[in-house]
Image (cartoon, coloured by chain):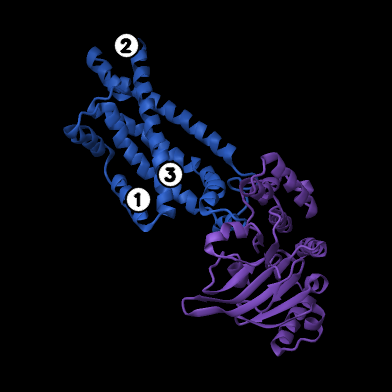
Amino acid sequence: MLLDVRDIHKAYKDVEVLKGVSLTLERSETKVIMGPSGTGKSTLLRCINRLTAPSSGEVYLDGTLIEERNINEMRQKIAFVFQDFNLFLHLNALDNVAMGPMRLKGLKRAQARERAMQELRRVGMQDHVESYPAQLSGGQQQRVSIARALAMKPEVILFDEPTSALDPELTGEVVSVMQNLASEGVTMLVVSHEIGFARRAADAIVFMEGGYVVEEGPPADIVSAPREVRTREFLQLIAAEGQVS
Amino acid sequence: MIFEIIINHIPYLLGGLWVAIQLLACVLVIGFVFGLLLALAEVYGHWSLRWSGIAFERVFRGIPELVLILMCFYGVGNWFPIDPFPAAVLALGLRSTAYQSQIFRGVIQAVPTGQVAAARAIGMSGVQAVCHVVLPQALRQVPGPWSNEFSSELKATSLAYVIGVVELTRQGKYIISSTQGNILIVFAVVALLYFVVNWLGNRVIYRAERALEIPGLERGEGD
């Protein structure tokens, strides 16, 4: 397996947010993590690339333990897409994407921009390369940030609620980019409530609640016949919201 | 005739102005370099560094410029001989370092934390994140508050008068003594020269501020 998350615990002072979470991801696999808010989904993602240090537990990427010692090297292989994009505000779209390859992969500026251009094309942002983040819509910013992740040629991309800061009419463009990536075989671990995306693109849905993984299985099984009561209730809630909007 | 006196002494006044500008340049450069280092120490440093930085800044913001100048010239002069000009550079440089460190600390802390998280997430070290992401954004915000510092240091150069630096104010005084010239008019000309330099300097800083703006994030637009 490519990513092996073993028994992650995370406590803030005396509140335990993650109570022993394990999951694995094969190469080219897409898994979607769902669950009520405050369940530790985002914390889990941040513990994987150590933006937040876990209290205990280990994460292995391709057999290598991720630790403080090798963290900068490992993060180049584990891209992270933020809920609120976090594009570099002082750089245009092209240079946002070229930054990593240029500063970390040792590419010359021209080569880095060429790679950036390819990745921007992949997310359909080739017509906005000169635009600065503040000049782009949320959906466009998120697509640029996905291109920034891709430009590092990572082994896996972690998505932390990539559409939840977007207006409903903008989520579609981001979801369709992610679906394309899934079908191209990019390995993705996605925290999201986009049930449509999970159905079409995910190999498995992981349902979390209260700091635990409650159940995991193929989208069809989880969505149509969840074993756990909590999963069923949560999915009904999501579906109800979907009908309202 | 007073105007004749002034016209005849213009080279002296301009000479004095040039000394004032040199003093100002030295002070601002020292303040910029050490102020930035101090701010980095205060924001990212070990607690001992942070604590020393804050102590330095409190002390030198809390002492009148004139007292500092007298201490640096007569006080330091007791230990080893120091000329008036370097003494003035030292005194005003310390003060400017303290003030500029506050400007830099403010703009560094104003960079959203998500920017650093994004830099770290692609694999940058802390130092790389500061160099490639934090400082390029923070330094763009400097010109606004820095124009205050420019103006106040320019005016503070006139205090070097008291330790015998022959800058603009002292040249004015010389003209008055040697010609029994009209005190008010001579100092009005001196004042006009300070005013013009101040005005020109602020124009340049304003231009820089505009040039450094990030497209889409212009002042007064967005949220």
Q: Callout 2: helix, strand or loop? A: helix
Q: Callout 1: helix, strand or loop? A: helix
Mark 3 sits on what residue? Answer: B36
Rendering coords of residue A228 (x, y %): 72, 89
On screen, residue B167 above or below A136: above
Supply the letter of whichever chain is purple: A
Left or right: B150 as drawn, with respect to A21: left
Rendering coords of residue A135 (x, y %): 69, 49
Rendering coords of residue B198 (x, y %): 43, 30
Query: Circle 1 marks a residue in which chain?
Result: B
Q: Callout 3: helix, strand or loop? A: helix
Supply the letter of whichever chain is blue: B
Whether pointer 1 and pointer 3 mark residues with C-beta atoms closer than 8 Å, the reply is no
Mark 2 sits on what residue? Answer: B5
Tell me if residue B200 can be seen.
Answer: yes
Left or right: B114 as drawn, with respect to B186: right
- Which quadrant holds the C terminus of chain A? bottom right
On screen, residue A74 above or below B187: below
Name the residue furthest front: A63
The amino acid type found where label 3 is placed reads Leu
